[in-house]
Amino acid sequence: MPEPNVNVSVNDPTGEADGAGTEPLVYDSWLGEQPDNIKEMLSGWEGGLKTALQSERSRAKDLEKQVRDASKKLDEGSDARAQLEALADNLAAAKQESAFFEAAHAAGANNIKLLFIAAKQDDVIRSDGSSDFVQLKSVYPQLFGSTAVLPRGNAGDGTDPPIGKKDMNAFIRKSAGRRP
């Protein structure tokens, strides 16, 4: 997964400068420039986060297995067994959806929930939550890429000159019946 750029620069770590002449700060390059004690501290913190994530995933997997085992001990066709099996199916679906969302984010999807619905409809999600995102990009290209929202007022994205430059004198002249 590519590292995101943050809104601070190498020259201005506070992020308070106007941004002119500064380059974006990337986590890996920033970390490489830090002293060893900072690297060790962040490495330990990152390791703790990864361990917590793995333990949560394994706990969810164990819980699903326990629910399935408990349902097998109940009578065939009973309401309790059907409810436990439905609960286990819901746990598996939540785990699959979470894994898909994580992979879709890494693949650059800009509308992950809609992509999940489309992938589910096309039946391209595997049981572990993985999917063929190259195929999904070719079928649903609009769900990948930029999420830039154009501002109101026909301002564009700020790179084009404004359309039809107007000023107060032009409005006054036009109201008086003169040409601008």
Image: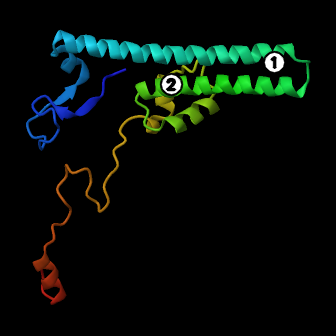
Q: Residue flagged by tag 2: what amino acid is it?
A: Gln
Q: Quadrant of the N terminus?
A: top left
Where does residue 80 sit, x and y in percent of width and height?
A: 85, 26
Question: Is 95 left, or right, of 6 in this rendering?
Answer: right
Residue 46 location, quadrant = top left
Farthest residue to the bottom: give it: 176
Where does residue 9 sit, x and y in percent of width and height?
A: 15, 32
- Could you give the CA–CA distance between mark 2 and mark 1, rounded to whole angstroms? 38 Å
Which is nearer the eye, 121 or 58?
A: 58
Question: Is 127 left, or right, of 115 in this rendering?
Answer: right
Which is nearer the eye, 54 or 29?
A: 54
Where does residue 168 sit, x and y in percent of width and height?
A: 13, 77
Q: Dot 1: what SS? A: helix
Is the residue under label 1 in contact with that under label 2 (CB below 8 Å)? Answer: no
Which residue is painted at 46% across and 29% down in the image? 137
Q: Is residue 123 visible?
A: yes
* Residue behind mark 2: 135
Q: Dot 2: what SS? A: helix
Disc 2 versus disc 1: nearer the observer: 1
* Residue behind mark 1: 71
Which residue is painted at 9% across and 40% down in the image? 20
Residue 93 location, quadrant = top right
Q: Is residue 117 above or below residue 70?
A: below
Which is nearer the eye, 56 or 126?
A: 56
* Mark 2 vs 1, N-terminal side: 1
Which residue is painted at 33% across and 12% down in the image? 44
Which residue is painted at 47% across and 38% down in the image? 111
Q: Is residue 124 visible?
A: no
Question: Is 10 left, or right, of 70 in this rendering?
Answer: left
Residue 97 location, quadrant = top right
Which is nearer the eye, 160 or 112?
A: 112
**Dot 2 surroundings within 10 Å: few (below 14), some, or many (20 or more)?**
few
